[in-house]
């Protein structure tokens, strides 16, 4: 789940659920500390927002880095590095983000580690057809959430205030679903 500015009128139907979801994710309360989040409530709100089937507008992805505030499903390695609570990254000092550019379909993923150090992976992306959709319908006519295939070609480890970096052997394909608010 990525947060995005600028709701369109088509997405206003889910405004209340969106606000509830963001409050749960960004301002959690609980007796066990700041990493506590009611995953059942979060998952239910995400399902409700997904059921709205808002139109996918690819240009909405090009507003700068989208900060990852919640994931569900199989835990990614970077998620495990970010927070002791599975599927929750926003309470950590470190952040993960994805910056997608619809004009050339490039992607830059970034995960902060150990204070000022971070890893980037860059490549391209493509929206995938939804069940029942013909490839000719791509990318118009898609509804959120949308499956995305990332094709990563390179990666770098960055550290220090002088901008030091080291090339990493990061490459391959991955798929994920995106629901932006």
Image (cartoon, helix red, strand yellow):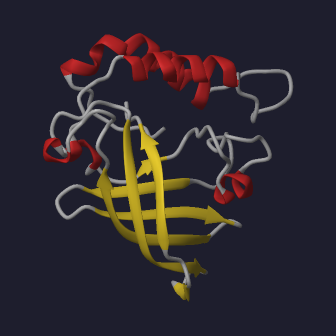
Res 144 quadrant in image: top left
**Picture coordinates of residue 112, whole percent (x, y):** 60, 63
Q: Residue at x 21, y 25 (%)?
A: 8
- Using residue 156 as the reference point, say whether residue 6 is left or right of it: left
In the depicted view, which residue is nearer to us: 74 or 16?
A: 74
- Find residue 28 and report its horizontal and vertical position in percent: 67, 25
Task: Indicate whether 8 appears above or below 155.
Answer: above
Residue visible at 28% across and 24% down in the picture: 54
Total of numbered circles in the picture?
A: 0
Q: Is 172 positioned to the left or the right of 74 in the image?
A: left
Classify 107 as above or below 158.
above
Q: Name the residue at the right extreme.
A: 32
Kindly identify the residue that appears in the image at 25 percent across and 51 percent down: 62
Q: Residue at x 70, y 53 (%)?
A: 82
Q: Is residue 123 above or below residue 37?
A: below
Relative image position of residue 15 (x, y in whole percent)? 36, 15
Quadrant assignment, res 106: bottom left
Judging depth in this view, the residue of 153 and 29 nearest the camera is: 153
């Amino acid at each position: 789940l990525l947060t995005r500015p600028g709701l369109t009128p088509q997405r206003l139907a889910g405004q209340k659920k969106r606000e509830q979801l963001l409050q749960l994710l960004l301002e959690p309360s609980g007796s066990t500390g700041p990493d506590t989040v009611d995953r059942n409530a979060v998952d239910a709100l995400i399902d409700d927002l997904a059921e709205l089937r808002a139109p996918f507008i690819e240009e909405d992805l090009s507003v700068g880095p989208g900060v990852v505030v919640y994931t569900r499903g199989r835990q990614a390695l970077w998620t495990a590095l970010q927070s002791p609570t599975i599927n929750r990254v926003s309470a950590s000092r470190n952040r993960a983000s994805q910056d997608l550019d619809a004009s050339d379909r490039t992607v830059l993923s970034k995960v902060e580690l150990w204070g000022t150090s971070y890893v980037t992976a860059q490549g391209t992306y493509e929206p995938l057809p939804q069940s029942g959709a013909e490839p000719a319908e791509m990318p118009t006519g898609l509804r959120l959430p949308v499956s995305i295939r990332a094709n990563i070609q390179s990666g770098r480890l960055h550290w220090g205030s002088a901008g030091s970096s080291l090339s990493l052997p990061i490459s391959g394909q991955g798929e994920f679903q995106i629901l932006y608010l």
